[in-house]
């Protein structure tokens, strides 16, 4: 279960009023796990793209660790 990918909104698709986005983690077999993450903002209110990308990678590592220790599980995606 090491090959996990995620999909998240592009920075350009995150509206000014959005404080959290939904990230979907998917295994090779198509099972999914969803989680919301906070959108980091700069002082001018724009999305901090570097911090956003760092946050996505950090959350991916966290999800992988939580799977390893059994703290979360993936569900089969309905077809």
Image (cartoon, rainbow, N blue to C red):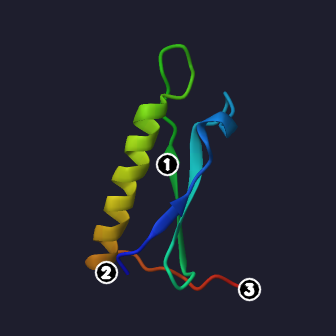
Q: Which residue is mark 3?
A: 79
Disc 1 is placed on an element classified as strand
Label 1 vs label 3: CA separation?
Answer: 26 Å
Q: Nearer the viewer, residue 17 or 49?
A: 49
Name the N-terminal-most of marks 1 and 2. 1
Name the N-terminal-most of marks 1 and 3. 1
Residue 1 sits in quarter: bottom left
Disc 3 is placed on an element classified as loop
Name the N-terminal-most of marks 3 and 2. 2
Q: With 16 as the anchor, is 54 left or right in this view? A: left
Residue lying at the far top of the rendered structure: 44
Nearer mark to the viewer, of 1 and 3: 3
Q: Residue at x 67, y 27 (%)?
A: 16
Q: Which residue is mark 2?
A: 70
Q: Nearer the viewer, residue 24 or 29?
A: 29
Disc 2 is placed on an element classified as loop
Q: What percent of the width, then of the height, locates residue 11?
A: 59, 37
Eyeballing the image, is 6 above or below 13? below
- Mark 2 is surrounded, within 10 Å at the Cα level, by few (under 14), some (14 to 19) or many (20 or more) other residues, namely few
Eyeballing the image, is 67 above or below 63? below
Label 1 vs label 2: CA separation?
Answer: 21 Å
Q: Residue at x 57, y 81 (%)?
A: 30
Q: What percent of the width, then of the height, locates residue 23?
A: 55, 57
Eyeballing the image, is 56 above or below 31? above
Q: With 17 as the anchor, is 36 left or right in this view? A: left
Q: Nearer the viewer, residue 38 or 49?
A: 49
Q: Which residue is mark 1?
A: 37
Q: With 23 as the anchor, is 54 left or right in this view? A: left
- Mark 3 is surrounded, within 10 Å at the Cα level, by few (under 14), some (14 to 19) or many (20 or more) other residues, namely few
Q: What percent of the width, then of the height, locates residue 18?
A: 64, 36
Tags 1 and 3 in contact by the CB under 8 Å rule?
A: no
């Amino acid at each position: 279960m090491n090959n996990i990918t995620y999909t998240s909104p592009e920075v350009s698709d995150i509206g000014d009023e959005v404080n959290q986005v939904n990230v979907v983690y998917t295994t090779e077999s198509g099972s999914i796990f969803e989680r919301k993450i906070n959108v980091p903002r700069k002082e001018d209110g724009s999305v901090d793209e570097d911090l956003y990308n760092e946050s996505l990678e950090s959350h991916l590592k966290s999800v992988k660790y939580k799977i390893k220790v059994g703290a979360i599980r993936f569900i089969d995606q309905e077809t």
